[in-house]
Image (cartoon, coloured by chain):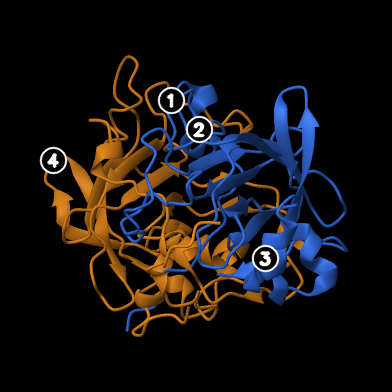
Chain colours: A orange, B blue
Amino acid sequence: MTDVETTDAKSPGYRPRDWSQHPPYLSPEYKSTVLRSPRKALIPMKGSLSELTGPVFGHESLDALDADLTRNGRVNGEPLGERIIVTGRVLDEDGRPVPNTLLEVWQANSVGRYVHKWDQHDAPLDPNFFGAGRCATDENGRYRFLSVKPGAYPWRNHHNAWRPAHIHFSLFGPSFVTRLVTQMYFPGDPLLPLDPIYNGVPEGARERLVSRFSIDVTEPEWALGYEFDIVLRGRLETPMEG
Amino acid sequence: MLKQTPSQTVGPYFAYALTPQPYGRVGLGSGTMVDPDTRGERIRIEGRVFDGTGAPVVDAVIELWQANAAGRYRHPADTRDQLELDPHFTGFGRTGTDGQGLYWFDTVKPGALGDGQAPHVNVTVLARGMLSHAFTRLYFHDEAGANAEDALLQSVPADRRATLVARRAETAGGVAYRFDIHLQGDDETVFFDA
């Protein structure tokens, strides 16, 4: 074992996951959680260099068309559907921007069909839409990507179960423990109050998964704009103990 | 203070985005974390993911984050410049489980951090049916001495500690460490409130 002093004792760690905001593992209305939810108490962890560090992905991980889902799957034309611009800021709990951090996004096409090989929903694939992309935040924590509005799709969780239209987001943030995978929804979707995945999030928190329509982000003769801000875990104020 | 954005499940249909190699696209990470010039002892980490009935979880995503063979993380918060970074190792891996619930990573054995912790690999588990992801750690069975001194590992109830310790096996392909993940049940893997 190398005998070196680590610097983690001098660096503030990250605030814990706020379980008043996140869904519990077991949420029986969402049936897949019943056998896949850890049931034993989570073991508390003080945090160390392992939790202060994490994979670093930013602009250098991007290709030119990654942030344009209306173009990155084209074969012989434009994807069908209502073009949308999705933008927002990635912030920490103290409101500080999280700059140069990568977002991975994926979604169904405009009629609710995923490119994924297992998706057998009887709705057409769009040969010009792949449905996955990436973008990174600027120095103010702002991200932006283009897509088409995803459709709702049936998912057999219960009789007549339909997922509200949504876009999946995956972020790492500055450390291994700031990881967040979530879903963004659209305002006014009548399926939201019926959706066990959305409803798995505590009331008062789930509403923040719904994007806002913005006429300012909307571009004339081109695409509708939606804003969706994302808040990752912030830093503790005082350094961790050793 | 702002409130954390709630987590949601990764769902069943993530592969073309998160592990897209079969779709002809390049992912952020894969099961192959090394190239021929990576420094350190080559190991394979492999295991299966099971649900509460012992059925394989065929649509989980496993992510690894680890120090290099010298015990250094490739991250700005690891300022121990006296320990070399390896240009051939990022420390990040990501893969999905297959039809048997099996996952594998080809990597190197991480060095100790030198802060009293035993060598370990940080693990994130995501899946359909998990509304929030789970954090765990992989420790190495052949590091018994270091494991006995690891404060976090020792804070885990003794009868559950073994769920965090991967067993070493010499296989035809080289050294493999077996790390099964049980999301639930009598053998439920220890997950951390990290």
Amino acid at circle 4: Glu
- Dot 2: what SS? helix
Q: Which residue is mark 2?
A: B16
Residue B25, which numbered label? Answer: 1
Q: Position of residue B156 (x, y in %)?
A: 73, 73
Question: Which label lies toward us, 4 or 3?
Answer: 3
A86 or B19: nearer the viewer: B19
Residue B43, which numbered label? Answer: none
Tell me, yes or no, whether dots 1 and 3 are on the same chain.
yes
**Res. A133 in view:** yes
Tell me, yes or no, whether dots 4 and 3 are on the same chain.
no
Mark 3 Cα-neighbour bin, 10 Å: few <14, some 14–19, many ≥20 = many
Q: CA distance from mark 1 to mark 3?
A: 32 Å
B111 or A58: nearer the viewer: B111
Q: Which residue is mark 4?
A: A221
- Chain letter belonging to callout 4: A
Residues tagged 2 and 4 counted as in contact (Cβ below 8 A): no
Mark 2 Cα-neighbour bin, 10 Å: few <14, some 14–19, many ≥20 = many
The quadrant holding residue A237 is: bottom left
- Dot 1: what SS? loop
Q: Residue at x 46, y 20 (%)?
A: B24
The quadrant holding residue A184 is: bottom left
Q: Position of residue B106 (x, y in %)?
A: 60, 33
Label 1 or label 3, whichever comes before in sequence order = 1
Q: CA distance from mark 1 to mark 4?
A: 32 Å
